[in-house]
Amino acid sequence: MWIELQDIHKYYGPVRANNGVSIKVVPGTIHGILGENGAGKSTLMKILSGYTQKTKGAILLDGKSVTYQNPAQAARLGIGMLYQDPLDFPLLSILDNFMLGQTGGFADQRKKYRQEFESLSNSINFSLDPDAVVRGLTIGERQQLEIMRMLALGIEVLILDEPTTGISGTQKELLFNALSKLASEGKSVILVSHKLEDVEALCHTVSVLRYGKVTGRMDAPFNTAELLKMMFGTLPVPPTRKPTKPGETVLDLQQVSASGGRTGLKSCTVAIRKGEIVGLAGLEGSGQGVFLRIASGLKQPKTGEVRLGGRKLGGQDYHALKRLGVAFLPTSRLEEGLISGLNITEHFALQSHHNGFLVRWQKAFEKAARRIDNFRIKGAPASPVESLSGGNQQRLLLSFLPANPVLLLLENPTRGLDVESVNWVWQHLQEYCASETGTCIVFSSSELDEIMMVADRVLVFFNGSVIKDTKTAETDTQELGRAIAGKV
Amino acid sequence: MVELNLSILLAGVVAGATPVVLAALGETITEKAGIINLSLDGTILLGAMAAFALSYETGSLLAGFMGGAAVGAVVAGIVAVFSIYLGQNQVAVGFVLTLMTRDLAYFLGNAYARLQGPQVPPQPIPLLSKIPFLGEVFFSHNIPVYFSLLFIAFCWWYIYRTPLGLQLRAVGEHPRAVYARGIDPRKLQVLYAVCGGCFVGLAGAVFSLSAKPGWGRPQGAEGTGWIALALVIFGGWHPVKAALGAYLFAFLQVMGIYFQGWFPSVPAQVFQVAPFPLMIFTLVLMHLAQKESVLSWAEEKAWMKSIVHMFSGAAPAALGKPYRSE
């Protein structure tokens, strides 16, 4: 199906998320929409999928102007969207999720839909158990389920919003194969991403968005430098790794086991030294999250011993460790890191530990304004945190960190951030390591390139254990990739 | 000494629990869809009053039951529309309504207090009621009791076996995702709030026309709504477990009467109040059954696993948080 977006405008109050976007998508191709965070990609796709309404402009399908009010009407026209956070039902089974929205009435139709599900999954090469409960699935598997559901609905135009965030290499391969197959069958695929490599690997054509406008369009093969220029105006500078001298041991885990996550943590023995930057690699939920939570005191190990700066820890909680200079930033910023509903000033007021009867608003406001400035957060002291973009939420969280932490634990610190923000975050973090305290940083990331770029050392997690512990200078992405898949 | 006759005792439990079962199932349906209707206690009283007054005036029991159901539907409809379309807090609206409907019932029902009115006659089912023991326990009652028994099975089948029930469960879990699938979550929620309300109103009608016939102040149904609300949680939002909870509660209350006879030295209030702490204790067990450590502990023990599974049950994820369009 030919899709043409003509001069799309979308205003949220004074904010112009889309400001005259025109894009044409040819059937049978994979069309990439590239742009940094806040460029207006998601808004544009929400308009196309019927989730929000445009302020101005026209959508043409096969040359005919169409209007629709909601995602269901869009689906009837053949447009379906896969959201970054799949819109599914965690407590229901895969089959129930698959059926929902396709069927109604009283009659039990699970048999029929089970057959349809199985033939679909064969044709597209996904292997999902229809009786499994969605709660236990990885993001990649949930995406597969959504794609199959879209296909069952007869979708001709499939929109994917940042589909490669948080999925494993194998799942990415499966996904890309499936998408190529769909395109070869004549369907149109629109891939929204801020990751150049994904777009370059998969797309036939790319449109680049910046500040709500199309800044360029390019057909494969792509010129990376050119694309970056379209995205950012100027070429972003990657952070340079500063040589660090590891000092004495800061964090020492001996045979630590714990439950949690998908796999728990199994007899993990690791020592992390002063001034080191350590990357935790591995599939989502292979034990990295548990590791970070044990080190931060949010979780207690079942067996084993944890030492911090030579002192044995026995059940100290997060607050006790925080006083010892341990800081932790979780991956889900709005759920664990920030308090949605409170604005930036209120976050600083809450942090001040001032126990008087009255909040010192003036002080909190000044502090917020200062930090907004220092950390280049796009927002005002009175902005509610949920209104900030992901990158700005992360900057805000970074601005909460104490001045001289001993140990910084970061869970996916750059998830969902564009190249420029990633660089900024790491430049900022590296200053900690270079400082007097010699902070050591332990971070998890699903991007091997990021680990190779900034870390001194990498720990590869597989199924709850550390199966590889090596210096980044002595390894490469291929070797690490194999380790992530469990082959050492 | 009171003689304990098991079949009479259980028959009493089945009959006595009927209105509580209906109210708890009605609320289970409502809460499965993500709406909390806190007005139960008042709704039951107003339903009881309306049912009695209507059947007294018209002489028709059917009119009474329909009136009771209509009252429940209207009150639930108010809760749903205020919260879903007008953005009001469900708890606040429900709470105000429970006080208002209670007082309204006493005020409007004043003229009908202590009048002799129609009541549902017992109708033992031929043949089935002749079965020893079971016949006496299950098949020697009246139509509302049979209806409540069938309704338990129907609820389970509807919620867990039909595509419509799937939609019902889904809208209580993730209304936004339901919207994305082309179903209007607001319509569904209003629909199921009203449906659930019907059965709450019906529970009131069963009180005044069958379980505690007549109308007065107090009617005898006071407090039932709160128990039904607790039973929904007790049942882990599962219709069959909620109904079993209702029977357990009725059983404990009936046993209280026997215990009073057996242990005359213990104050009667102890037995009247005993079911309540027991309910709280079960809630503690339910909370434990959802803990990760307990789950992993029970994983290896087959019998323990099924017990833990029985007690587990989580609230619909979007309970009390209706869908807001973007």
Image: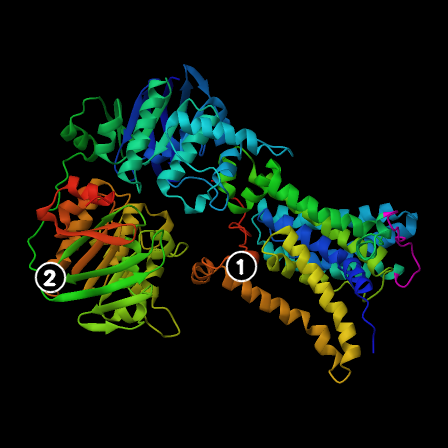
Question: Where is residue A122 shown, x and y percent of the image?
Answer: 41, 27
Q: Residues within 10 Å of mark 2 (few under 14, many from 20)?
A: few
Q: Which corner quadrant of the image does residue B244 belong to? A: bottom right
- The answer to whether residue A5 is seen in the rendering is no
Q: Which residue is mark 1?
A: B303
Of residues A104 and A136, which is closer to you in this image? Answer: A136
Under mark 1, the amino acid is: Trp
The stretch of residues the image draws in magenta is B113-127
Q: Residues within 10 Å of mark 1 (few under 14, many from 20)?
A: few
What scheme was used to colour the molecule? rainbow
Residue depicted at x 89% and y 60%: B111
- The answer to whether residue A438 is seen in the rendering is yes
Instruction: Give the CA separation, mark 1 to mark 2.
Output: 58 Å
Q: Which residue is mark 2?
A: A435
CB under 8 Å between discs 1 and 2: no
Question: Where is residue A128 shown, x and y percent of the image?
Answer: 42, 36
Residue B41 — which label? none
Q: Which corner quadrant of the image does residue A216 belong to? A: top left
Taking B207 as reference, is A69 left or right?
Answer: left
Labels 1 and 2 share a subunit: no
Question: Where is residue B253 shown, x and y percent of the image?
Answer: 74, 68
Q: Magenta: predominant secondary structure element?
A: loop
Task: Please identify the residue farthest to the bottom as the structure is shown.
Answer: B265
